[in-house]
Amino acid sequence: MRHFLTLKDFTKEEILEIIETGLSIKKNLKSKIYNQELKNQTLAMIFEKSSTRTRVSFETGIFQLGGHALFLSNRDIHLGRGEPVKDTARVISGMCDMVMIRTFEHSKIEEFAAYSKVPVINGLTDSYHPVQLLADYMTLVEYNSHENIVAAYVGDGNNMTHSWMMLAAKLGFELRVATPKGYEVDAKILQEALDIAKESGAVIKIMNDPMEAVKGATVVTTDTWVSMGQEDEKDKRIKTFKGFMVDNAMMSLARKDAKFLHCLPAYRGLEVSEELFEKHSEIVFNEAQNRLHAQKGLMVWLDRHKAE
């Protein structure tokens, strides 16, 4: 059974195949051609962390593919609280055709997948956000910015940073990660990415100077400084991250045709300036909409590979 928990588990060819499947579905949708490949299938969506884009994209996506979505919030289900994760996995996977989980600990989704009879998709954990990276790379393909990538990630060493490292390691491009001291990426995940990079030829650089990271970059990306569950650290983080806001001055160090990406929600005046965000808003919102198309490509791909 193939699950989508992290890009680490997929080859370069498989990642590109998922992207191509999503692009094909998106092209058909524009022509009002609806792919009903998942007709009558049910996607269970488990949300321990709320999200606008994740719910709308998965629920709309499975509907457009001919299936049905079942929304389960933390009021409806208590994953690992009251019932063991492995029991919940066996119950839900015995009734549904696919499961998407958005939760906290990555170990929780790994345990669920180990006992699931159907594909499990990581909608976000504290360690990884791989579906967002599918949308990000799809967007770069659409803007013809996917060749010879030099990407700069500026901000917190969080799940988005980890997923960018895995994408770079798998596809073989250069990634520079700039975080404040004390907010670096997870050392174990970094080592895993570096080990993969040895085979792909990827270059992953970790630093604390955002200006150095952005210099000559073809892609610049960032994320919120205060993730869900870190609200009590907000004031401290805002002070610590001073100088890490992506604005026109920082972006001017990148290539003139560099693309700016943001997974949203965007907090203007913190990780990105209002002016810079609005200047690049077209690609950012196309990136957001590509969550729908990339995830449809993923669900179709996983369904086709159930027997593997």
Image: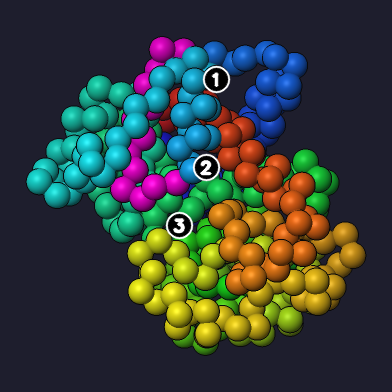
Q: Earlier in the sequence, mark 3 or mark 1?
A: 1
Q: Nearer the viewer, mark 3 or mark 1?
A: 1
Which disc is residue 106 wearing?
none
- Say the numbered circle drawn on residue 128: 3
Residue mark closest to the camera, 3 vs 2: 2
Q: Does the magenta stretch include residue 48?
A: yes
The answer to whether residue 170 is visible is: no
Q: How crowded is mark 3: few (under 14 residues within 10 Å), some or many (20 or more)?
A: many
Pinpoint residue 12: horizontal percent, then vertical percent. Answer: 61, 47
Residue shown at 10%/46% (left/top)?
Answer: 82
Q: Is mark 1 on a helix, strand or loop?
A: helix
What stretch of residues is rendered in magenta? 37-51
Name which of mark 1 and mark 2 comes first in the sequence.
Answer: 2
Taking 110 as reference, is 82 left or right? Answer: left
Question: Which amino acid, by three-letter code, is at mark 3?
Answer: Tyr
Name the residue beneath numbered marker 1. 64
Q: Disc 2 designates what residue?
A: 53
Instruction: Look at discs 1 and 2 and give the one toward the viewer.
Output: 2
Residue 154 highlighted magenta (yes or no): no
As shown in the figure, which amino acid type bears the numbered disc 1?
Gln
